Image (tube, coloured by chain):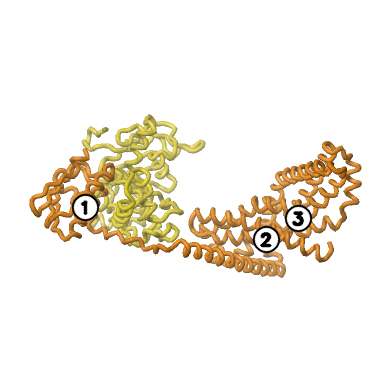
Chain colours: A orange, B yellow
Amino acid sequence: MTATLLESTTEGERLRLAAAGAWTAQHARVIEKLIDTQTGKREAIRSVVVDAGGIEKLDTFGAWLLERLVRAWKAHGCETAIVGLAETYRGLMDEVRTVPENAPDQRRHRGEIVHTVIAVGRTMVKALDSLVSSANMIGAVSIALLRVLVRPRRFRLTAMVHHLENVGWRAVPIILLITFLIGCIIAQQGIFHFRKFGADVYVVDMVGILVLREIGVLIVSIMVAGRSGSAYTAELGSMKMREEIDALRTMGFDPVEVLILPRILALIIGVPILTFLGSIAALYGGGLVAWFYGGIDPEIFLGRLKEAISLQTFEVGMIKAPFMALVIGIVACVQGLKVKGSAESLGLQTTASVVESIFLVIVLDGLFAIFFASIGM
Amino acid sequence: MVTNGRSGKEVVIAVRDVVVGFGEANVLNHLDLDVYRGEVLGFVGGSGAGKSVLMRTIIGLLPKRHGKIEVFGVDMDAASDKERQAVERRWGVLFQQGALFSSLTVKENVQFPVREYLKLSQRLLDELAVAKLEMVGLSADVQDKFPSELSGGMTKRVALARALALDPEIVFLDEPTSGLDPIGAGDFDSLIATLQRTLGLTVFMVTHDLDSLYTVCDRIAVLADGKVIAQGTMETMLASEHPWLRAYFHGKRARSLDRNAAAAHA
């Protein structure tokens, strides 16, 4: 089959190429190789005649390859002609003849080091940019909040309650489960290691302080960032993609006031409640493990807990919660509004939203630790 | 391959007694339709009448409750996966919104089916992408753009180039001119006509555009109440006394068409 697709005979300075068979997509790979070997010949050839009389079937693949053959010989300064092509394929050949030469790849190739430098530069600019846009968003949300405070009737209570249900109420089971398990694990590890030097009972201090000050709010924030922050980014992103946000703006609504403020307020209300519930569940889990695994009676556990923690320990955890919520909400909304037209960018921004908010939540927790230590709380 | 005894033309799509429904209601009710090789069939009907449903049923995106669909003489229900794939390679589909892959560039979108089905060199793939884009009237400098950067008309053209990538024998077009301005729609019509002539395509076109029907379609099939209530040339449609056809082809939007027809007759 392949042998008959293209055959050549040289008559002095004349090259005669006989094309035959089905010049279609199926055989395009073979034909391309045949053409390349034909045009690779460097003999003293002045004119080329392509006899296309034997071509039984021609599609755009074949037509382009025929055209490429002709162009390659023309580039060598040969006279070329196609003869005997069936009349039905004339239109197709005319169509292909107008195709311009493929422009060479315009992307410049740079060295490895330059590439790295460019990538680092881009990342830094992006980080700076996201800092600026976060500041921008905090400003816009504050202004929207002030406007709403001046005219409370403009506030979208229904929307906020709806979001509160999604980020708060519906998150309760999973938050309770996770924090309960974390409480159990901390208590179990504590008892296991403290027992070696007979300090079992101090596990109550550890569980109480760790859970109320740090772990409760951190676990809840990370869960909320993964669960609700990503949802916010995806929602706002697909609204941006389908021009819904532009539509709102043209109708004279402020998207920050209509879409973002209710979402962020729902988080600020929801996260402290979840933190409270989560901390209690963790203490409960810790208490159960202490009882069954460590043999510490609930009465002793509670008595010890009262001594170990104060209201201040609880306050330290709870004060952090709304700030964590604010960070998650702002990051999620900023990333949502950065989404461009493609499905890929929606995925990228949602990932960025979760990664960035978890990172910032942990950084913020560190800053709070320094702050509380310096004011002696 | 099935041929129609009456006209002697080769039938490439045969739809027989097809029922398609959602929930309680049947959208297509024992529908029959033939599409002949090399023709441009315009498929019209009211909004929600089930035009796109039939198209999606033929290309296998929707399940049917009853009936048989043959494409190139292959019964699509009885066919093995391999036979189905062989048939699918011989048709191209232009979706209403273009359905371009948003994370690929224009060039990659056009190359996608070719790359998957044929093992061609990158050079040939690139040249073919330019050739296909040129055929649908786009210059080579759009090839590195992403779908989100294209206008509505360009999106449709790129989608058409992708539908034509494997040189199909049948092209399904779902409202190809919707959302285009009259000049763009006219260009698109003549583009379809040119490609149909040069490539010998069979075109199955779902449309609302009376001008498209008038300028490019060889035959028109009308869908109402889940059945094809009439089929034939534009003249047959204009001459029909059926109330829905009269309302469709002689309504306010169709006045210019009437004038054209009158001029043609005079």
- Give the class, few, some or many, for how many residues have Cα within 10 Å of label 1's Cα (few <14, many ≥20): few
Secondary element at image label 3:
helix
Which quarter of the picture shows residue A290? top right
Q: The residue marked by circle 3 belongs to what chain?
A: A
Q: CA distance from mark 3 to mark 2?
A: 13 Å
Task: Provide residue A103's location: percent of width, then percent of height.
Answer: 31, 61
Query: What amino acid does circle 1 point to?
Result: Gly
On screen, residue A149 versus residue A316, left or right, reads left
The image quarter in which residue A300 lies: top right
Residue A266 rendering spot, x and y as whole percentages: 70, 57
For the residues labelled 1 and 3, say whether their Cβ atoms are less than 8 Å apart: no
- Which SS class for mark 1? helix
Residue A296, percent from left and from top: 88, 40
User: Are the residues under marks 1 and 3 on the same chain?
Assistant: yes
The answer to which of A201 and A253 lies nearer the viewer is A201
State how far apart marks 1 and 3 are (Cα).
75 Å
Residue at 40% over, 57% down? B179
Mark 1 belongs to chain: A
| Quarter occupied by the N terminus of chain B | top left
B235 displayed left or right of A170: left
Residue tagged 2: A327
Q: Name the amino acid type tagged 3.
A: Pro
Q: In this figure, which residue is indicated by the disc labeled 3?
A: A272
Q: Furthest-top residue in view?
A: B78
**Relative to B240, A255 lies left or right:** right
- For mark 1, what is the residue? A40
